[in-house]
């Protein structure tokens, strides 16, 4: 979803400590090169979607006291990991923004496969987290901790 509103309450749950956190998202229809079946292109399209999402957020904030500090992309596929990694070095990424990915091993790809794609962590630039199989899937507390919230 695309919003700077407070996060939704899920099942009546209140997200304690999240009063001033905001979420902004993008959509798959925001950018497409037309080559969605080309595995060498798929993650680049997803990276462009991240760039569009961050630009929307920058435009929404447009206030010097409010700045983006971290972008978190969540996914369960190699293309998700590679998209976030690509965006970490994208020319449009604001300089002081850290890019993270939370890889969730849902079964299609293993923890090791996702972790290997991450490469080395670069503090303040590229900060990937791969959750162990089953962790974070339906476990909101583990997921929120992985987001650093």
Image: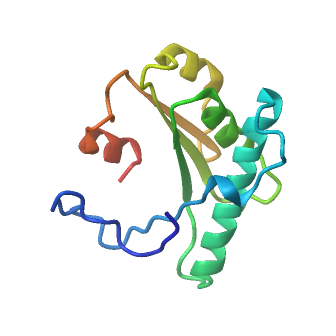
Q: Is residue 22 above or below residue 63?
A: above
Question: Does residue 72 appear in the picture of this structure?
Answer: yes
Q: Position of residue 68 (x, y in %)?
A: 57, 66
Q: Where is residue 139, by image quadrant?
A: top left
| Residue occupying the far bottom of the picture | 63
Question: Does residue 88 appear in the picture of this structure?
Answer: no
Q: Position of residue 21 (x, y in %)?
A: 39, 67
Q: Is residue 14 above or below residue 91?
A: below
Q: Position of residue 119 (x, y in %)?
A: 65, 24
| Residue occupying the far left of the picture | 12
Residue displayed at 66% across by 78% down:
59
The number of numbered discs placed on residues in the rendered structure image is 0
Residue displayed at 42% across by 26% down:
106
- The residue lying toward the viewer, choosing from 54 and 94, is 54
Q: Where is residue 140, by image quadrant?
A: top left
Which color scheme does this rendered protein use? rainbow
Q: Where is residue 107, by image quadrant?
A: top left
Residue displayed at 37% across by 21% down:
133
Residue displayed at 53% across by 82% down:
65
Q: Position of residue 2 (x, y in %)?
A: 52, 68
Q: Is residue 73 above or below residue 92?
A: above
Name the image quarter holding the C terminus. bottom left
Q: Is residue 25 above or below residue 3?
A: above
Image position of 40 (left or right of 130)? right
- The residue lying toward the viewer, choosing from 132 and 10, is 10
């Amino acid at each position: 979803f695309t919003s700077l509103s407070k996060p939704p309450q899920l099942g009546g749950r209140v997200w304690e400590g999240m009063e001033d956190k905001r979420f902004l998202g993008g959509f798959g229809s925001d950018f497409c090169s037309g080559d969605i079946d080309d595995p060498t292109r798929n993650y680049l399209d997803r990276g462009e979607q991240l760039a569009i999402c961050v630009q929307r957020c920058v435009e929404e904030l447009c206030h010097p006291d409010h700045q983006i500090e971290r972008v978190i992309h969540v996914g369960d596929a190699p293309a998700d990991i590679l998209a976030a990694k690509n965006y970490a070095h994208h020319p449009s990424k604001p300089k002081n923004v850290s890019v993270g990915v939370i890889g969730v091993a849902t079964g299609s790809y293993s923890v090791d496969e996702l972790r290997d794609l991450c490469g080395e962590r670069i503090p303040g630039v590229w900060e990937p987290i791969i959750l162990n199989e089953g962790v974070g899937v339906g476990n909101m507390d583990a997921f929120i901790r992985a987001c650093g919230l």
